[in-house]
Amino acid sequence: MLSQDPTKAKLLEAAGEEFALNGFEGATIRAICVRAGVNQAAVNYHFRSKEQLYAQAVIAAHQCRTHISDELPLESLSPTEALRLYIYSFLKNVLEIQTDGATWRSELMMREILHPTEACDALVKESIGPQFERLREILGRTCPEADDTRIHVIGFSIVGQCLHYKMANAVCRRLMTTERYDQLNLDYLTDHITGFTLAALGLATPLDGAGSPGSLVQSASSEVLQ
Amino acid sequence: MLSQDPTKAKLLEAAGEEFALNGFEGATIRAICVRAGVNQAAVNYHFRSKEQLYAQAVIAAHQCRTHISDELPLESLSPTEALRLYIYSFLKNVLEIQTDGATWRSELMMREILHPTEACDALVKESIGPQFERLREILGRTCPEADDTRIHVIGFSIVGQCLHYKMANAVCRRLMTTERYDQLNLDYLTDHITGFTLAALGLATPLDGAGSPGSLVQSASSEVLQ
Amino acid sequence: MLSQDPTKAKLLEAAGEEFALNGFEGATIRAICVRAGVNQAAVNYHFRSKEQLYAQAVIAAHQCRTHISDELPLESLSPTEALRLYIYSFLKNVLEIQTDGATWRSELMMREILHPTEACDALVKESIGPQFERLREILGRTCPEADDTRIHVIGFSIVGQCLHYKMANAVCRRLMTTERYDQLNLDYLTDHITGFTLAALGLATPLDGAGSPGSLVQSASSEVLQ
Amino acid sequence: MLSQDPTKAKLLEAAGEEFALNGFEGATIRAICVRAGVNQAAVNYHFRSKEQLYAQAVIAAHQCRTHISDELPLESLSPTEALRLYIYSFLKNVLEIQTDGATWRSELMMREILHPTEACDALVKESIGPQFERLREILGRTCPEADDTRIHVIGFSIVGQCLHYKMANAVCRRLMTTERYDQLNLDYLTDHITGFTLAALGLATPLDGAGSPGSLVQSASSEVLQ
DNA sequence: AATGAATGAGCCTTCATTCAT
DNA sequence: GATGAATGAAGGCTCATTCAT
């Protein structure tokens, strides 16, 4: 999928995992090559340096992610339904409740977002940008009178709410009791963020804390946050 | 304030800046000691290891931050006003539009939040926890019917919106034109997040994008995001 | 001339330049192949190893040099004239005041002379030896009573004087002012070494420093040492 | 003598030997440290890099050499005697027929002379320059009418003759039979070069090859060239 | 209490070489 | 015959740490 060359592909995969786990400085070429099962000199042969391997790994990682735009028929839904579906899909991606259970792609992206390198441009252009564009389309339909800047900050409010559970996961866990924290599964968070947002946009009744709106999405999984 | 020992204090300050700038692995003891103007062996002498220096530096850093709870008389305000003041204060802290212009304390906290170490417990207990508790008090008054879990996720929604401009700053910048990005100063963001949140809670009219509610806080500064 | 195989020839040429410039250890196979415009594996394919490439390059290099014995009709000259012509020709070769301006062949020979490898035998046998033999013939005519050992050391005295300006060029330059150093062109050195040698052999009046003997060789060039 | 610091001194000594033996590129820091019996990281601690270690080693090496100017009372001798003594001393130094038998200092100097680095300036200024100055003083007395340039080239003729047996030793050996080469001991070469030079300067009868002038210097050694 | 010197481990990179095609 | 891919070994260097003072 990424490359016909098995060595290069193995290296990108292994590098992604190591960089996600230990960061750029913390990861070592030796560990990457051991994980990939290739010779240590292969990194400098296929990529010129550790830096370039990192950049390529980041780009390769997000190219493997499932894009929301690919799987969601947002146009055929009402804005309300589309928004809920978007948030659900975004959360699922972020919390990486996915098929293969590989959690490192999101980790790598979070690192890149917080401390951008030269790979950030490509990441935004090819992955984050199009994904955010889908959100702006939805919001454009729900808030026809908002200007472009306001559409952006509304989008950021939505994305920020979702990403918080990835970025500040450790803090969230420590701020709650274990029992309460365990309630924060995908459905609960989807309901909350969707309800919060729709109410803010005037598309639903404000939160009163009495109950949660029914979930539009049938989800068999109720995994808690990792 | 940090320590009676000048060498130790200098070391903690220098370590905080280096760790914030380069991360734990990227920062070197040599650079820290050069910055602090002390001998390289001093780190292992005063602290036992690089790890412990990092932990102490994190704790020392957030002890210097101005706590919202210290400066805001939230009890004497209406819930709406208190919330706006909280968001304003939080954003100002996060965006580090502060007196000394030292941006490294927030950087260090973001690193610790995203990749928690043993210092995370102390950070939450002594700094983030009390701060979040103030928010929960405000929310408890505005949403008397919400249970504790819901109070938490509402709090996370607020905090997540604010932190997004710190965490994903590089991405936000790339998703907008420079002109629009430059609009996102402290006042604008305070207005937006406050309005978004109040509407979600039924304390204000929903956003329609037509205009921004007037600012409760008189702010002389209109600094854009760094 | 060197080889029918164009790849092999290009490799030898490129290797000679790289080895001359950086020495055996300093030169890399990659740089040689880049310069030759061939694949990196070609060296180990055509030659067995870096060592053998070096040896072949040294031999190939001195095979391209113009031999004094080829261009000088020493037999038809008086011993005095022959000696002057030999010294002139030797100096010209050493100082590499030549047509193509390629200075690397002499460099390579100097390296081999100072730190002989297995290529030294061939170098002496095929290039230096015959050239020295011509000098011995001349000296045999001027010093008929000298034994073979003395002929050798007289020859070494002549060659040593000439080579000094190649070998210790950097030192000579630093021992003189720039103006005086610039006087040391081919004619001046030919006159000096010839006069010095002829006087030592009783074939001319001793040096008194008053002036230089007229040059037998008409030289249009007055290049200074490089 | 070089330094009070034992590690630094050991390192300079070992580095000199390794660099003399294998050249800058060929010598490895590991071998140097093994020879010096110190840790490999000591090189980067005391000197900043391999380059600077090399430069310091060259300077340190020639500072240990016995200066002709220190041991020869040239002023009390006739010019002829002084010249012979100078040549004898120079040859002894070059051929390194010395007490400790350490041949590496001359080797290192030859390398630096042929391929000068930044250490060359110091080498000329502190070691070669003063030594050559003594020769110029002697020549100034024997050739009162020669200008400065001519004094220099006469000096180069003398030094060139001597150095040839060091620089081109391998070639000399190959150009002669072993029996004849073995005749070239210190006395023989001193006699030859002195006679050759004195005759060239009109201070002795020209060479006729019949015999060698008696040696002024009583030498117990008759070592052949190494 | 504090420091210059020294160290073992490990880093990234480059080397000459070989392999599979 | 010739080459892109891959490799084991070693390179110089930097790291956090410890030692002796």
Image: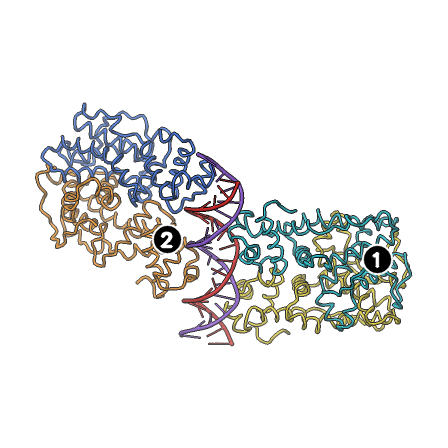
Chain colours: A cyan, B yellow, C blue, D orange, E red, F purple
State the image coordinates of residue C135 (x, y, percent, origin top left). 20, 33
Secondary structure beneath dot 2 equals loop
State the image coordinates of residue B163 (x, y, percent, origin top left). 74, 61
Which chain letter goes with mark 1? A
Label 1: few (<14), some (14–19) or many (≥20) C-alpha neighbours in 10 Å? some
- Which residue type carries mark 2? Ala
Please name the residue that numbered disc 2 is placed on.
Answer: D27
- Which residue type carries mark 1? Val
Which chain letter goes with mark 2? D
Asked if residue C83 is positioned above or below residue D47 in the image, the reply reads above
Q: Nearer the viewer, residue B144 or C217?
A: B144
Label 2: few (<14), some (14–19) or many (≥20) C-alpha neighbours in 10 Å? many
**Would residue B173 be found to the left or right of residue C103 on screen?**
right
Nearer to us of marks 2 and 1 is: 1
Q: Nearer the viewer, residue A71 or B174?
A: A71
Q: Quadrant of the N terminus of chain C?
A: top left
**Would residue A132 be found to the left or right of residue A76 on screen?**
left
Secondary structure beneath dot 1 equals loop
Please name the residue that numbered disc 1 is placed on.
Answer: A217
State the image coordinates of residue B108 (x, y, percent, origin top left). 65, 64
State the image coordinates of residue D104 (x, y, percent, origin top left). 28, 54
Asked if residue D12 is positioned above or below residue B151 in the image, the reply reads above
